[in-house]
Image (cartoon, rainbow, N blue to C red):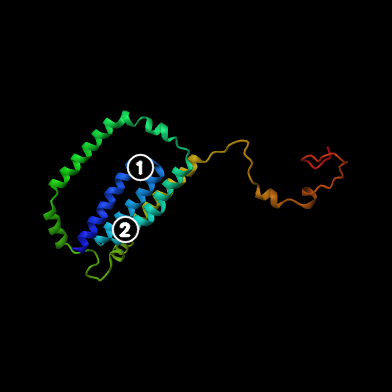
Amino acid sequence: MIQAAVFYLFAAVVVLSGLMVILAKNPVHSVLWLILAFFNAAGLFLVIGAEFVAMILVIVYVGAVAVLFLFVVMMLDIDFTSLRAGFSRYLPFGALLGLVLAVELVTVGFFWEFGDLALQARAAPAPGANAGLSNTQAIGTILYTDYVFIFQLAGMVLLTAMIGAIVLTLRQRPGVKRQNVAAQNARTPETSIAVTRPKVGAGVDTDGGVK
């Protein structure tokens, strides 16, 4: 009974937060509502016993993705008036798309085979249940033993994507002053200090001479 009440509480907050992400007029408020939805979705995963997925959702999506969205939205100079200008023009298309998605969700809900899935879940024991391992330990054991090469391959793919993004965005722009560490370390007092005796009212130019 308590588990069902907690589930419906988290589910209701997730649905309301998702609606507020769309309906909020300020993008910063939308990102904050999205963070709330992520936290409650993590609570739903905890209810079904998937604590590893819940922590990954909080650490990755809340701690990295949502915070990145928040920083980007706060740093960008967004013209909210121009964004709301085309709302009425695209409203029919958005309503039609939302209706199609709603029909698909209702159809899936009616034809979902809850009984067969429940029987399969009861017949198949959870990984590591016989060994006395927790959910996180069971996932780690399988991930780093049976699928360790696939895990490393996924890391290499992400590393390649990161290097490619850096290479594509790195540009050598002319006229930009850059630091030359070797030249700075090779400077001596004779080349760095110039002693001059300017006259009263005269200045010193950038080369160390008297104007």
Q: Which quadrant holds residue 40?
A: bottom left
Residue occupying the point 34% across, 32% down: 87
N-terminal label among 1 and 2? 1
Q: Residue beneath label 2, please?
A: 54
- Asked whether, in this view, residue 199 is left or right of residue 191, the answer is right
Residue occupying the point 52% across, 41% down: 170
Question: Can residue 184 be seen in this snapshot?
Answer: yes
Q: Which quadrant holds residue 202?
A: top right
- Asked whether, in this view, residue 11 is left or right of residue 39, the answer is left
At mark 1, the secondary structure is loop
Evaluate if marks 1 and 2 touch, with contact meaning CB atoms under 8 Å apart: no
Front residue of 80 and 100: 80
- Asked whether, in this view, residue 33 is left or right of residue 207, the answer is left
Front residue of 116 and 154: 116
x, y percentage for residue 77?
48, 38
Instruction: Inspect the image, locate mark 2, and give the three-letter code of the amino acid beneath it.
Output: Ala
Q: Residue beneath label 1, please?
A: 24
Question: Could you give the CA–CA distance between mark 1 and mark 2, rounded to whole angstroms?
Answer: 26 Å
Q: Residues within 10 Å of mark 1 (few under 14, many from 20)?
A: few
